[in-house]
Amino acid sequence: VRGGRVDQNLVLVDEAPLYNSSHLLGLLSVVDNNAVKEVNFFRSGIPAKYGGRVSSILDIRLKEGNSRSFNGSASINPFFAKLNLDIPLVEDRLNLVVSARQSYAALINLFVRQEETKLTPGFSDGSLKLNYRLGKKDKLFFSFYAGNDFIKSEETNKQGSRPIRKAKWGNLLANLRWNHLFSNKVFANLSLIYSDFNFEMKGINGNFSRSIYPVITTAQVRGQEIKYDLS
């Protein structure tokens, strides 16, 4: 946004920072739209509570679900399949929302012309949100998201072998939030937030070095946060 780098834009999923925000190298969002309740986007006049970003804020909130009736949907297209479930566990008290997607890496290759180098991309992700009403003034929410991407590369060298390169990366997010209502105008949220991003790249038969042994490069970003908000 406005020329900002990745670290100058903040993407949140139920308050947890999301470090990789797309699947298939930018073609799809990492969060299924059927699992989203609302999205708030700020490109200027960013509220002080977000802090630390100068370009933009994308605040995604997952659905809280229906505690009275079951709802479900499923769909399949040439690139991926997805499933969405809204499950009431205890009427008017406890419910669960589940969303999952899985790509078909082999089918993606049918739409891409490849000759000497064969690239196989793919992804999977899933989210859930548990909503528990403790009483008239208290609610407990638990949100969880996990998503992974990968890309494999197969090539033919002069000796006729087929060396393989593989990269994989993904997010893992969790948030446990307690909501308390003091009055019709005042409420508080206490959140325990965990966020993790992992990246791994592996080369075999000297793709990334002159060694005949596999070379593995890894990176990780991890964060924990306790937040109290009174409004």
Image (cartoon, rainbow, N blue to C red):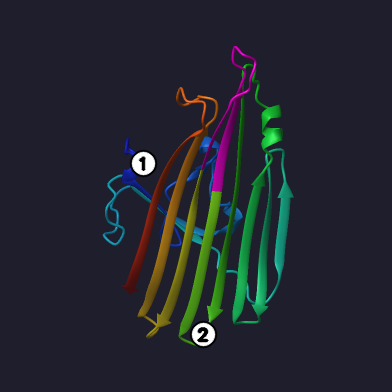
For badge 1, the amino acid type reads: Val
Residue lying farthest front? 212
Judge by depth and name the residue closer to the eye, 8 or 161.
161
Q: Is the magenta stretch mostly helix, strand or loop?
A: strand
Asked whether residue 34 is drawn in magenta, I would say no
Q: Is residue 149 above or below residue 68?
A: above
Q: Position of residue 204 (x, y in %)?
A: 54, 29
Magenta region includes residue 155: yes
What residue sits right under mark 2 in the picture? 134
Kindly identify the residue that appears in the image at 34 percent across and 69 percent down: 227
| Residue at image point 50% right, 47% down | 170
Q: Quadrant of residue 154?
A: top right
Rendering coords of residue 95 (x, y %): 61, 74
Magenta-highlighted residues: 148-168
Disc 2 residue crowd, few under 14, some 14–19, many 20+, Cα 10 Å: some
Q: Mark 1 points at which residue?
A: 6
Residue 36, percent from left and from top:
54, 58
Question: Residue 227 shows which numbered tag?
Answer: none
